[in-house]
Image: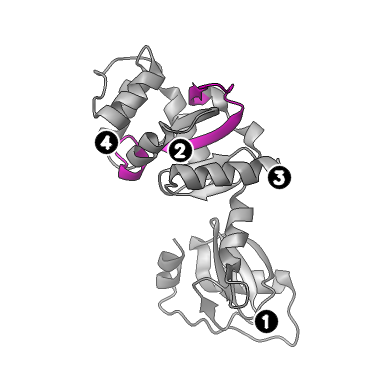
Amino acid sequence: MIKKLLAATCAAVLTMTAFAQSSDADVKKRVEAALGDSAKVDSVRKAGALGLYEVVVGGEILYTDDKANHIILGHIVDPKTRKDLTQERLDKLSAIKFSDLPLDLAIKQVKGNGGNGKRMIATFEDPNCTYCKKLAKELQGVTDITVYTFLYPILSQDSIDKSKAIWCAPDRAKAWNDTMINGTTPAAAKCDTAALDKIMGLAQKLHIHGTPAIFLADGTRVPGFMPAAQLEQSMAQAAEKH
């Protein structure tokens, strides 16, 4: 999205009127003026590095100087700690309150095997997404977890058709697993699929642009596929904070 916005300006370097001192509001006005009506700046704050300002546009981060003479795309990394400071900020900005999710719109699976499924994650997935299928197979080996899957068909019309068939199936969890693990989608059936439209709106509000997207119990967003072992570690860390 950011690249498209910058392309609209016809240059990666933006020159604007300079002021002696700048506030966050000043920088915001200058960036919005430079990007034009095609962009809405969500927030501006000092980045804490290189004297830059962090600008959030559509859930993404770019950087600029106080006069908005230049726009910088990319991540800031602390060479001493090897921490990706930009990714840390993105993770914080994209976090949600898990209890605010409309879980009644999701396919619920409780995996016990000695536990009670007290650990929770929520996923947004497309039935034709390769990495979503890998995630489904990885989750087969994860126990004591409740998985809420939101059908988010964004890849094709076929994804929409499969999602509707899964949602209208008598056993949605079985239909989902058959599709993702066994490659067998249930026959098309008619039912109220308004939930899929609501999920689409929710995903757009949360700036979810790809699948799978995973949310942990503490609201942390995991961008993309994660192997079971890594997911276990992330869930343990989320439990400590939750």
Residue 157: which disc?
Answer: 4
- Mark nearer the viewer, 4 or 2: 2
Disc 2/disc 3 C-alpha distance (Å): 23 Å
Residue 170 position by quadrant: top left
Q: Which mark is residue 241?
A: 3
Q: Type of residue at label 1?
A: Gly
Secondary structure, mark 3, is helix
**What residue lies at 34% left-to-right and 41% top-to-bottom?**
134
Q: Is residue 164 visible?
A: no
Q: CA distance from mark 1 to mark 3?
A: 31 Å
Q: Image check: 106 left or right of 240?
A: left
* Tag 3 and tag 4, C-beta contact below 8 Å: no
- Where is residue 211? Give x, y as percent: 40, 44
Residue at mark 2: 124
Range of residues picked out in magenta? 105-132
Q: Gap in Å between the C-alphas at discs 3 and 4? A: 40 Å
Mark 4, mark 1: which one is toward the viewer? 1
Q: Marks 2 and 3: which is nearer the front?
A: 3
